[in-house]
Image: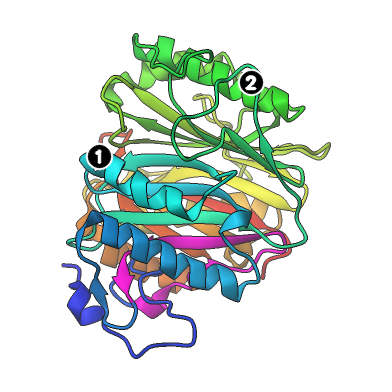
Protein backbone atom coordinates (compact mmCIF):
# COMPACT_ATOMS: atom_id res chain seq x y z
CA UNK A 1 0.00 0.00 0.00
CA UNK A 2 1.22 3.50 -0.75
CA UNK A 3 2.12 5.67 2.18
CA UNK A 4 -0.02 8.69 3.06
CA UNK A 5 1.07 12.25 2.42
CA UNK A 6 1.49 12.73 6.17
CA UNK A 7 4.27 10.13 6.26
CA UNK A 8 6.08 11.95 3.45
CA UNK A 9 6.83 15.04 5.55
CA UNK A 10 10.42 16.11 4.90
CA UNK A 11 12.91 18.53 6.31
CA UNK A 12 12.76 21.47 3.82
CA UNK A 13 15.48 21.34 1.18
CA UNK A 14 17.18 24.12 -0.74
CA UNK A 15 14.95 23.09 -3.64
CA UNK A 16 11.83 21.40 -2.24
CA UNK A 17 11.82 18.21 -4.28
CA UNK A 18 9.01 16.75 -2.18
CA UNK A 19 6.22 15.52 -4.47
CA UNK A 20 8.32 15.48 -7.58
CA UNK A 21 9.10 11.83 -7.06
CA UNK A 22 6.04 10.37 -5.39
CA UNK A 23 6.44 7.08 -7.17
CA UNK A 24 7.39 4.61 -4.50
CA UNK A 25 6.55 6.62 -1.42
CA UNK A 26 10.24 7.52 -1.07
CA UNK A 27 10.63 11.10 -2.37
CA UNK A 28 14.36 10.73 -2.94
CA UNK A 29 13.93 7.70 -5.21
CA UNK A 30 13.59 9.73 -8.40
CA UNK A 31 14.97 13.13 -9.22
CA UNK A 32 12.35 15.67 -10.33
CA UNK A 33 14.22 16.34 -13.54
CA UNK A 34 16.93 14.78 -15.65
CA UNK A 35 19.80 16.52 -17.40
CA UNK A 36 19.15 17.45 -21.02
CA UNK A 37 21.12 20.04 -22.95
CA UNK A 38 17.99 21.65 -24.43
CA UNK A 39 15.07 20.81 -22.16
CA UNK A 40 14.06 20.57 -18.52
CA UNK A 41 11.92 17.48 -17.93
CA UNK A 42 9.87 17.86 -14.75
CA UNK A 43 8.46 14.66 -13.28
CA UNK A 44 4.84 14.17 -12.31
CA UNK A 45 4.21 16.70 -9.54
CA UNK A 46 1.40 16.71 -7.00
CA UNK A 47 0.08 19.48 -4.80
CA UNK A 48 1.98 18.85 -1.59
CA UNK A 49 3.09 21.80 0.50
CA UNK A 50 6.87 21.27 0.93
CA UNK A 51 6.86 22.95 4.34
CA UNK A 52 4.30 20.55 5.84
CA UNK A 53 4.39 17.46 3.64
CA UNK A 54 0.59 17.67 3.37
CA UNK A 55 -1.56 17.75 0.27
CA UNK A 56 -3.12 21.16 -0.20
CA UNK A 57 -6.84 21.41 0.39
CA UNK A 58 -9.18 21.08 -2.58
CA UNK A 59 -8.64 20.83 -6.31
CA UNK A 60 -7.71 24.49 -6.80
CA UNK A 61 -5.32 24.37 -3.86
CA UNK A 62 -3.55 21.28 -5.17
CA UNK A 63 -3.22 22.65 -8.71
CA UNK A 64 -1.80 25.92 -7.40
CA UNK A 65 0.64 24.14 -5.07
CA UNK A 66 1.78 21.71 -7.78
CA UNK A 67 2.48 24.61 -10.11
CA UNK A 68 4.36 26.47 -7.39
CA UNK A 69 6.51 23.41 -6.76
CA UNK A 70 7.24 23.15 -10.47
CA UNK A 71 8.07 26.86 -10.59
CA UNK A 72 10.78 26.41 -7.97
CA UNK A 73 12.42 23.69 -10.06
CA UNK A 74 12.19 25.72 -13.26
CA UNK A 75 13.77 28.70 -11.52
CA UNK A 76 16.61 26.54 -10.22
CA UNK A 77 17.27 25.45 -13.82
CA UNK A 78 17.39 29.03 -15.08
CA UNK A 79 14.02 28.96 -16.82
CA UNK A 80 10.38 29.74 -16.00
CA UNK A 81 6.76 29.15 -17.03
CA UNK A 82 7.12 31.36 -20.11
CA UNK A 83 9.52 28.73 -21.49
CA UNK A 84 7.26 25.71 -20.97
CA UNK A 85 6.66 23.71 -24.15
CA UNK A 86 4.37 20.84 -23.27
CA UNK A 87 2.28 19.88 -20.24
CA UNK A 88 0.49 16.71 -19.20
CA UNK A 89 -2.26 17.21 -16.63
CA UNK A 90 -3.51 14.03 -14.99
CA UNK A 91 -6.75 14.33 -13.01
CA UNK A 92 -8.15 11.77 -10.62
CA UNK A 93 -11.65 12.89 -11.62
CA UNK A 94 -12.52 14.46 -14.98
CA UNK A 95 -15.25 16.53 -13.27
CA UNK A 96 -12.44 18.69 -11.87
CA UNK A 97 -11.43 19.89 -15.33
CA UNK A 98 -13.01 23.35 -15.14
CA UNK A 99 -11.72 24.08 -11.66
CA UNK A 100 -8.24 22.98 -12.66
CA UNK A 101 -8.35 25.26 -15.71
CA UNK A 102 -9.23 28.33 -13.66
CA UNK A 103 -6.03 28.04 -11.65
CA UNK A 104 -3.85 26.64 -14.45
CA UNK A 105 -4.48 29.54 -16.84
CA UNK A 106 -3.20 32.06 -14.26
CA UNK A 107 0.31 30.62 -14.73
CA UNK A 108 0.20 31.13 -18.50
CA UNK A 109 -1.27 34.59 -19.19
CA UNK A 110 -0.10 34.49 -22.83
CA UNK A 111 1.25 32.00 -25.37
CA UNK A 112 0.50 28.95 -23.20
CA UNK A 113 2.26 25.63 -23.83
CA UNK A 114 0.67 22.67 -25.55
CA UNK A 115 -1.24 20.37 -23.23
CA UNK A 116 -3.04 17.07 -22.88
CA UNK A 117 -5.43 16.49 -19.96
CA UNK A 118 -6.81 13.06 -19.09
CA UNK A 119 -8.31 11.23 -16.14
CA UNK A 120 -6.19 8.49 -14.51
CA UNK A 121 -5.51 6.89 -11.14
CA UNK A 122 -2.89 8.82 -9.17
CA UNK A 123 -0.21 7.22 -6.96
CA UNK A 124 -1.11 9.13 -3.79
CA UNK A 125 -4.45 8.74 -2.01
CA UNK A 126 -6.25 12.06 -1.81
CA UNK A 127 -4.40 13.60 -4.75
CA UNK A 128 -6.61 15.34 -7.31
CA UNK A 129 -3.96 16.28 -9.87
CA UNK A 130 -0.51 15.40 -11.13
CA UNK A 131 1.34 17.64 -13.58
CA UNK A 132 4.39 16.79 -15.69
CA UNK A 133 5.99 19.11 -18.21
CA UNK A 134 8.86 19.94 -20.52
CA UNK A 135 10.42 23.42 -20.63
CA UNK A 136 13.03 24.94 -22.92
CA UNK A 137 16.36 26.06 -21.56
CA UNK A 138 17.23 29.72 -22.20
CA UNK A 139 19.30 29.11 -25.34
CA UNK A 140 16.49 27.29 -27.18
CA UNK A 141 14.15 29.33 -29.38
CA UNK A 142 10.46 28.94 -28.50
CA UNK A 143 7.77 29.78 -31.06
CA UNK A 144 4.02 29.34 -30.81
CA UNK A 145 2.51 27.63 -33.84
CA UNK A 146 -0.88 29.03 -34.82
CA UNK A 147 -2.22 27.15 -37.87
CA UNK A 148 -4.33 29.35 -40.11
CA UNK A 149 -6.66 26.40 -40.73
CA UNK A 150 -7.49 25.89 -37.06
CA UNK A 151 -9.55 28.16 -34.83
CA UNK A 152 -7.56 29.18 -31.75
CA UNK A 153 -8.26 26.94 -28.75
CA UNK A 154 -10.77 28.27 -26.24
CA UNK A 155 -8.89 26.52 -23.45
CA UNK A 156 -5.47 27.53 -22.04
CA UNK A 157 -3.20 25.74 -24.48
CA UNK A 158 -1.56 26.30 -27.86
CA UNK A 159 -1.93 23.97 -30.83
CA UNK A 160 1.82 23.68 -31.19
CA UNK A 161 5.11 24.97 -29.82
CA UNK A 162 8.27 24.79 -31.91
CA UNK A 163 11.50 24.62 -29.92
CA UNK A 164 14.51 24.47 -32.18
CA UNK A 165 13.75 21.61 -34.57
CA UNK A 166 11.25 19.93 -32.24
CA UNK A 167 7.52 20.49 -32.47
CA UNK A 168 5.34 19.76 -29.45
CA UNK A 169 1.72 19.20 -30.49
CA UNK A 170 -1.20 19.53 -28.08
CA UNK A 171 -3.37 16.55 -27.29
CA UNK A 172 -5.75 16.71 -30.25
CA UNK A 173 -9.38 15.67 -30.12
CA UNK A 174 -12.03 15.49 -32.81
CA UNK A 175 -12.83 19.19 -33.26
CA UNK A 176 -14.06 21.07 -36.29
CA UNK A 177 -11.10 23.18 -37.48
CA UNK A 178 -13.34 26.17 -38.27
CA UNK A 179 -15.56 26.23 -35.17
CA UNK A 180 -13.63 24.30 -32.48
CA UNK A 181 -16.86 22.36 -31.88
CA UNK A 182 -16.68 18.57 -31.34
CA UNK A 183 -17.00 16.34 -34.39
CA UNK A 184 -18.82 13.21 -33.28
CA UNK A 185 -18.82 9.79 -34.90
CA UNK A 186 -17.18 6.43 -34.44
CA UNK A 187 -13.56 6.13 -33.34
CA UNK A 188 -12.33 5.85 -36.94
CA UNK A 189 -14.09 9.08 -37.91
CA UNK A 190 -12.72 10.86 -34.85
CA UNK A 191 -9.17 9.55 -35.35
CA UNK A 192 -9.14 10.86 -38.91
CA UNK A 193 -10.37 14.26 -37.74
CA UNK A 194 -7.72 14.30 -35.02
CA UNK A 195 -4.99 13.63 -37.57
CA UNK A 196 -6.42 16.30 -39.82
CA UNK A 197 -5.89 18.80 -37.02
CA UNK A 198 -2.43 17.41 -36.24
CA UNK A 199 -1.58 17.75 -39.91
CA UNK A 200 -2.53 21.43 -39.84
CA UNK A 201 -0.12 22.01 -36.93
CA UNK A 202 2.64 20.12 -38.73
CA UNK A 203 2.06 22.08 -41.91
CA UNK A 204 2.23 25.42 -40.07
CA UNK A 205 5.66 24.38 -38.76
CA UNK A 206 6.83 23.29 -42.24
CA UNK A 207 6.63 19.62 -41.30
CA UNK A 208 4.50 16.64 -42.30
CA UNK A 209 3.36 13.30 -40.89
CA UNK A 210 6.74 11.79 -41.75
CA UNK A 211 8.34 14.01 -39.11
CA UNK A 212 6.29 12.58 -36.24
CA UNK A 213 8.64 10.98 -33.71
CA UNK A 214 6.38 9.96 -30.86
CA UNK A 215 2.66 9.89 -30.09
CA UNK A 216 0.57 8.95 -27.08
CA UNK A 217 -2.96 7.81 -27.80
CA UNK A 218 -5.51 8.15 -25.01
CA UNK A 219 -8.67 6.14 -25.68
CA UNK A 220 -11.99 6.23 -23.91
CA UNK A 221 -12.73 2.57 -24.69
CA UNK A 222 -9.95 0.02 -25.26
CA UNK A 223 -12.37 -2.25 -27.15
CA UNK A 224 -12.10 0.20 -30.06
CA UNK A 225 -8.32 -0.20 -30.30
CA UNK A 226 -8.35 -2.15 -33.57
CA UNK A 227 -10.71 0.31 -35.24
CA UNK A 228 -8.55 3.23 -34.12
CA UNK A 229 -5.48 1.48 -35.57
CA UNK A 230 -7.10 1.18 -38.99
CA UNK A 231 -7.55 4.95 -39.18
CA UNK A 232 -4.22 5.71 -37.48
CA UNK A 233 -2.33 3.59 -40.03
CA UNK A 234 -3.57 5.85 -42.85
CA UNK A 235 -1.42 8.67 -41.45
CA UNK A 236 1.54 6.64 -40.21
CA UNK A 237 2.04 3.85 -42.72
CA UNK A 238 5.79 4.05 -43.37
CA UNK A 239 8.32 4.33 -40.53
CA UNK A 240 5.59 5.42 -38.08
CA UNK A 241 6.36 7.25 -34.83
CA UNK A 242 6.96 5.48 -31.55
CA UNK A 243 3.69 5.17 -29.65
CA UNK A 244 1.96 4.30 -26.41
CA UNK A 245 -1.79 3.65 -26.30
CA UNK A 246 -3.71 3.60 -23.03
CA UNK A 247 -7.26 3.93 -21.82
CA UNK A 248 -7.93 7.13 -19.86
CA UNK A 249 -10.80 9.45 -19.13
CA UNK A 250 -11.25 12.22 -21.71
CA UNK A 251 -12.52 15.66 -20.81
CA UNK A 252 -15.60 15.61 -23.05
CA UNK A 253 -17.75 12.45 -23.07
CA UNK A 254 -18.37 12.74 -26.83
CA UNK A 255 -14.67 12.22 -27.56
CA UNK A 256 -13.37 8.72 -28.11
CA UNK A 257 -9.68 9.46 -28.64
CA UNK A 258 -7.05 12.09 -27.89
CA UNK A 259 -3.60 12.00 -29.50
CA UNK A 260 -0.58 13.95 -28.28
CA UNK A 261 2.53 13.98 -30.49
CA UNK A 262 6.07 15.26 -30.85
CA UNK A 263 7.68 15.82 -34.24
CA UNK A 264 11.29 16.55 -35.02
CA UNK A 265 12.97 17.66 -38.22
CA UNK A 266 16.17 15.92 -39.11
CA UNK A 267 17.73 14.21 -42.10
CA UNK A 268 19.07 11.53 -39.77
CA UNK A 269 15.62 10.24 -38.70
CA UNK A 270 15.67 6.44 -38.42
CA UNK A 271 13.62 3.64 -36.91
CA UNK A 272 15.45 1.62 -34.24
CA UNK A 273 14.65 -2.04 -33.64
CA UNK A 274 16.32 -4.28 -31.07
CA UNK A 275 18.80 -6.74 -32.54
CA UNK A 276 17.06 -9.96 -33.53
CA UNK A 277 13.61 -8.39 -33.23
CA UNK A 278 11.16 -7.61 -36.01
CA UNK A 279 9.02 -4.55 -36.52
CA UNK A 280 5.56 -4.60 -34.92
CA UNK A 281 2.56 -5.33 -37.12
CA UNK A 282 0.70 -2.46 -35.47
CA UNK A 283 1.38 1.07 -36.81
CA UNK A 284 4.19 2.13 -34.50
CA UNK A 285 7.96 1.85 -34.36
CA UNK A 286 9.81 0.45 -31.33
CA UNK A 287 11.87 3.65 -31.35
CA UNK A 288 12.59 6.62 -33.58
CA UNK A 289 15.93 8.36 -33.45
CA UNK A 290 16.49 11.88 -34.74
CA UNK A 291 20.01 13.16 -34.21
CA UNK A 292 21.04 12.62 -30.60
CA UNK A 293 17.48 12.11 -29.31
CA UNK A 294 15.60 8.81 -29.32
CA UNK A 295 11.90 8.32 -28.67
CA UNK A 296 11.01 4.84 -27.39
CA UNK A 297 7.53 3.38 -27.73
CA UNK A 298 5.53 2.27 -24.75
CA UNK A 299 6.71 -1.30 -24.17
CA UNK A 300 5.14 -4.11 -22.16
CA UNK A 301 6.38 -7.24 -20.45
CA UNK A 302 6.08 -9.73 -23.27
CA UNK A 303 9.24 -11.73 -23.91
CA UNK A 304 10.29 -14.77 -25.96
CA UNK A 305 8.34 -17.04 -23.62
CA UNK A 306 5.22 -14.90 -23.65
CA UNK A 307 3.98 -12.85 -20.71
CA UNK A 308 3.99 -13.66 -17.00
CA UNK A 309 0.28 -13.33 -16.26
CA UNK A 310 -0.45 -11.61 -12.98
CA UNK A 311 3.22 -11.13 -12.06
CA UNK A 312 3.98 -7.39 -11.91
CA UNK A 313 7.64 -7.83 -11.00
CA UNK A 314 8.34 -10.26 -13.86
CA UNK A 315 6.48 -8.05 -16.33
CA UNK A 316 8.37 -4.94 -15.19
CA UNK A 317 11.74 -6.66 -15.57
CA UNK A 318 10.83 -7.94 -19.03
CA UNK A 319 9.54 -4.51 -20.04
CA UNK A 320 12.87 -2.99 -19.04
CA UNK A 321 14.73 -5.76 -20.86
CA UNK A 322 12.79 -4.89 -24.02
CA UNK A 323 13.52 -1.20 -23.61
CA UNK A 324 17.16 -1.91 -22.79
CA UNK A 325 17.61 -4.01 -25.92
CA UNK A 326 16.16 -1.21 -28.04
CA UNK A 327 18.47 1.34 -26.41
CA UNK A 328 21.42 -0.98 -26.99
CA UNK A 329 20.60 -1.16 -30.69
CA UNK A 330 21.34 2.58 -30.80
CA UNK A 331 24.43 2.15 -28.59
CA UNK A 332 22.65 3.72 -25.62
CA UNK A 333 21.64 2.53 -22.19
CA UNK A 334 19.45 3.54 -19.27
CA UNK A 335 22.02 6.22 -18.43
CA UNK A 336 20.85 8.04 -21.56
CA UNK A 337 17.20 8.12 -20.52
CA UNK A 338 15.95 11.59 -19.59
CA UNK A 339 12.24 10.97 -19.01
CA UNK A 340 9.74 8.15 -18.70
CA UNK A 341 6.02 7.67 -18.34
CA UNK A 342 4.93 4.57 -16.45
CA UNK A 343 1.39 3.31 -17.03
CA UNK A 344 0.06 0.77 -14.53
CA UNK A 345 -3.11 -1.25 -14.82
CA UNK A 346 -3.27 -1.29 -11.01
CA UNK A 347 -1.92 1.81 -9.30
CA UNK A 348 -1.23 -0.19 -6.12
CA UNK A 349 1.70 -1.75 -8.01
CA UNK A 350 3.50 1.60 -8.01
CA UNK A 351 5.80 0.77 -5.09
CA UNK A 352 6.90 -2.60 -6.50
CA UNK A 353 7.54 -1.17 -9.95
CA UNK A 354 9.32 1.85 -8.49
CA UNK A 355 11.70 -0.37 -6.55
CA UNK A 356 12.66 -2.26 -9.71
CA UNK A 357 13.14 0.98 -11.63
CA UNK A 358 15.39 2.27 -8.85
CA UNK A 359 17.54 -0.84 -9.12
CA UNK A 360 17.73 -1.20 -12.90
CA UNK A 361 17.31 2.32 -14.29
CA UNK A 362 18.45 4.48 -11.39
CA UNK A 363 17.30 7.85 -10.14
CA UNK A 364 18.36 9.93 -13.15
CA UNK A 365 15.32 10.10 -15.45
CA UNK A 366 12.27 12.12 -14.53
CA UNK A 367 9.51 9.62 -13.80
CA UNK A 368 5.75 10.08 -14.02
CA UNK A 369 3.49 7.24 -12.96
CA UNK A 370 -0.25 6.81 -13.33
CA UNK A 371 -2.90 4.13 -13.37
CA UNK A 372 -4.44 3.61 -16.81
CA UNK A 373 -6.02 0.86 -18.86
CA UNK A 374 -3.63 -1.06 -21.11
CA UNK A 375 -4.41 -2.57 -24.50
CA UNK A 376 -3.36 -6.19 -23.94
CA UNK A 377 -5.61 -8.30 -21.71
CA UNK A 378 -2.68 -9.57 -19.62
CA UNK A 379 -0.55 -6.41 -19.54
CA UNK A 380 0.07 -4.92 -16.10
CA UNK A 381 2.67 -2.27 -16.97
CA UNK A 382 3.71 -0.19 -19.97
CA UNK A 383 6.73 2.15 -19.97
CA UNK A 384 7.56 4.84 -22.50
CA UNK A 385 10.98 6.53 -22.55
CA UNK A 386 12.89 9.43 -24.05
CA UNK A 387 16.67 9.11 -24.36
CA UNK A 388 19.44 11.46 -25.38
CA UNK A 389 22.93 10.51 -26.47
CA UNK A 390 24.42 13.39 -24.46
CA UNK A 391 22.73 12.47 -21.16
CA UNK A 392 24.83 10.35 -18.81
Picture quadrant where residue 306 is located: top left
Query: Residue at the bottom extreme?
Result: 11
What residue is shown at x 36% (from left), y 77% (from top)?
27
What residue is shown at x 57% (from left), y 67% (from top)?
34
Q: Residue 302: horizontal and vertical position, in percent?
A: 39, 43
In the rendered view of the protein, which quadrant contains the C terminus?
A: bottom right
Part of the protein shown in magenta: 27-49
* Foreground residue among 210 and 151: 151
Give the tally of numbered discs. 2
The residue pinned by badge 2 equals 200
Q: Secondary structure at mark 2?
A: helix
Q: Residue 282: horizontal and vertical position, in percent?
A: 49, 25
The answer to whether one can see residue 101 in this image is yes
Mark closest to the chain's N terminus, 1 or 2: 1
Question: Any mark on residue 94, and which?
Answer: 1
* CA separation in Å, label 1 and label 2: 28 Å
Amino acid sequence: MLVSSRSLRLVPLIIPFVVLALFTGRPASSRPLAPDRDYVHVAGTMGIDPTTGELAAGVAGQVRQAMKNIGVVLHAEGTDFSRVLSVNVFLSDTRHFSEMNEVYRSFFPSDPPTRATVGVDLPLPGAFVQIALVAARPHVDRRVIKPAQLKSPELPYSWGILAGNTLFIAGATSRDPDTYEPVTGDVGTQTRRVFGNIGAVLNAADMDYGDLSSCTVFMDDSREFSEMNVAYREFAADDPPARATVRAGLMNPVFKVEIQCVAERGASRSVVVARGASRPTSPFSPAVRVGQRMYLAGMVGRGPEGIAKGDIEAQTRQTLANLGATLAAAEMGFGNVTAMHVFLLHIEHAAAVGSILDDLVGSGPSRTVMGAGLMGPDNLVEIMMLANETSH
